[in-house]
Image (spheres, helix red, strand yellow):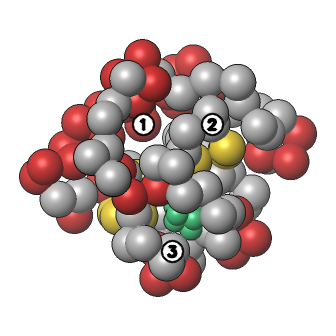
Amino acid sequence: MTHVITEPCIGVKDKTCVGECPVDCIYEGKRMLHPPDECVDCGTCEPVCPVEAIFCEDDVPGQWAQFTTENVRLSGQLGSPGGAAKTSPLPYDTGYLASYVTGR
Ligand code: SF4
Ligand code: SF4
């Protein structure tokens, strides 16, 4: 299980969460950020997000359920690089996230 970043992060990307992660596993994608399999589920990032985009996988709101699937998909693409400082920013998200329309 991991934490999942959802729709409100798209286009915000202020990276407050990045500085809070004890294992540096929040990776910057093209439109939003992603915590992949390296997430140890500590929950530290969740309360610091100014737009409440971060949820424990079990608590992702229903309307954003697909973001959990996309997080798994992106984890598969990314693998375990061992720290966002080594790889970010990534030049991609998943296809679903690339074409997601926020309405904002
Ligand atoms: S703190 Fe929230 S809005 Fe900012 S980058 Fe992290 S998930 Fe996105
Ligand atoms: S839950 Fe903890 S380990 Fe996972 S992304 Fe957030 S701060 Fe990092």
* Residue at 23% across, 58% down: 60
Q: Quadrant of ligand 1?
A: bottom right
* Residue at 66% across, 71% down: 16
Pointer 3 residue: 49
User: Which mark lies nearer to you, 2 or 1?
Assistant: 2
Q: Secondary structure at mark 1?
A: helix
Pointer 1 residue: 71
The image quarter containing residue 13 is bottom right
Q: Which x, y percent locates residue 50?
A: 49, 78
**Residue 69 in the figure: left or right of residue 5:** left
User: Which is more N-terminal, label 2 or label 3?
Assistant: 2
* Residue at 21% across, 48% down: 64
* Residue at 41% across, 64% down: 54
**Residue 45 in the figure: left or right of residue 53:** right
Q: Dot 2, how many residues are within 10 Å of its Cα: few (below 14), some (14-19), or many (20+)?
A: many
Q: Which x, y percent locates residue 98?
A: 45, 24
Measured along the vertical axis of the image, is residue 94 above or below residue 31?
Answer: above
The image quarter containing residue 8 is bottom left
- Label 3 and label 2: CA atoms lie apart by 16 Å
**Residue 67 in the figure: left or right of residue 28:** left
**Residue 11 in the figure: left or right of residue 89:** left
- Label 2 and label 1: CA atoms lie apart by 11 Å
Q: Secondary structure at mark 3?
A: loop
